[in-house]
Amino acid sequence: MSEKQEDMGSESPRVDEEIRLPVDEHIEEEVSASGKKVRAKGVYLLPNLITTGALFSGFYAIVAGMGGNFEAAAIAIFAAMILDGLDGRVARLTDTQSAFGVQYDSLSDMVSFGLAPALVVFSWGLGPLGKLGWAAAFLYAACAALRLARFNTQVDTVDKGVFIGLASPTAAAIVASMVWAGHDAEVGTGLAIIAALVTVAAGMLMVSNFHYSSFKKLDFKGRVPFVMLLVIILVFSLVTIDPPRVLLVIAVIYTFSGPAMWAWKGVRERRKGQLQSEPSQSAVAGKDDEKS
């Protein structure tokens, strides 16, 4: 055997050596199981199946919007909202939370509450504005991406009871309910301008610093006053009367709650500062009287 053949033989892998693939075909991560951290392969089926349903609803909304079926597109976005609210709670109740599920849910939210509302509202009412229309739709989608990225980086440091900035599902509810309410209307320049302003406002509120209640601290297992049950029944009754317009009103009220609480907090702090300054001014006046 020549030297060249010997060199080639030394470089070839041995038969008994394990050949490793460049990419592992399994997902392995540290998950929580009964309060303990363990390493496990694979993914949890139930919460990720619900997230997949939300992702499908967002994708269907895009397809329906491109086909001109705006009512179905808006309903699909609301279906994605319901599924998005379920996957996290199901994961917590069944102790199936994982880092993979968090990232998958975030990507699903980007499709269902970022791209889907932007494309649906553009197909419905922003087309007459030309470049301004698609610029407004893109601004909304970009703000949704920024909102989700900021949320992922602050999820471990921010109070669980509040959202910083308008949550992307609520922003999507505003846009979707607006499209749903006017799906059979003739969209002219005036209505297109209103739709663009609403879309841009919803996008900018997502990246704002206004605080919104997340309702994550509500105890669904505890007891509540009987009146609370009557209020919930009343809300459901109102929604059944005219779903798109009632849902739009609810979304708008929640949207304005952030700026309203910010303004109320500023007024309270100003009043508190005035009350603190008044005793100090009276003390200075008393010292001046003593000197005189």
Image (spheres, grey):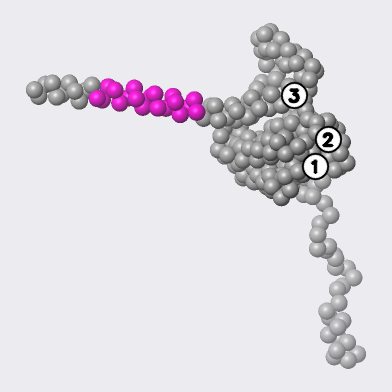
Residue 64 lies left or right of residue 262; in this view the side is: right
Asked if the residues shown at circle 1 and circle 2 are in contact, with their CB atoms under 8 angstroms apart, the answer is yes
**Vertical relation: 93 (above or below) 49:** above
Q: Earlier in the sequence, mark 3 or mark 1?
A: 1
Boundaries of the magenta span: 263-281
- What amino acid type is highlighted by mark number 2? Phe
Residue 246 versus residue 76: which sits nearer the camera?
Answer: 246
- Residue in view at x 44 percent, y 24 percent: 268
Residue 216 versus residue 189: which sits nearer the camera?
Answer: 189
Q: CA distance from mark 3 to mark 1?
A: 20 Å
- What amino acid type is highlighted by mark number 1? Ser
Q: Position of residue 97 (x, y in %)?
A: 73, 37
Residue at the disc numbered 3: 245
- Residue in view at x 65 percent, y 22 percent: 218
Circle 3: element type: helix
Residue at the disc numbered 1: 123
- What amino acid type is highlighted by mark number 3? Arg
**Vertical relation: 183 (above or below) 139:** above
Q: Is residue 275 magenta?
A: yes
- Residue in view at x 69 percent, y 47 percent: 132
Residue at the disc numbered 2: 70
Residue placed furthest toward the bottom: 2
Give the mark count. Answer: 3
Circle 2: element type: helix
Residue placed furthest toward the top: 226
Q: Position of residue 241 (x, y in %)?
A: 79, 16
Residue 185 lies left or right of residue 248; in this view the side is: right
Circle 1: element type: helix
Residue 181 lies left or right of residue 140; in this view the side is: right
Q: Earlier in the sequence, mark 2 or mark 3?
A: 2
Q: Earlier in the sequence, mark 1 or mark 2?
A: 2
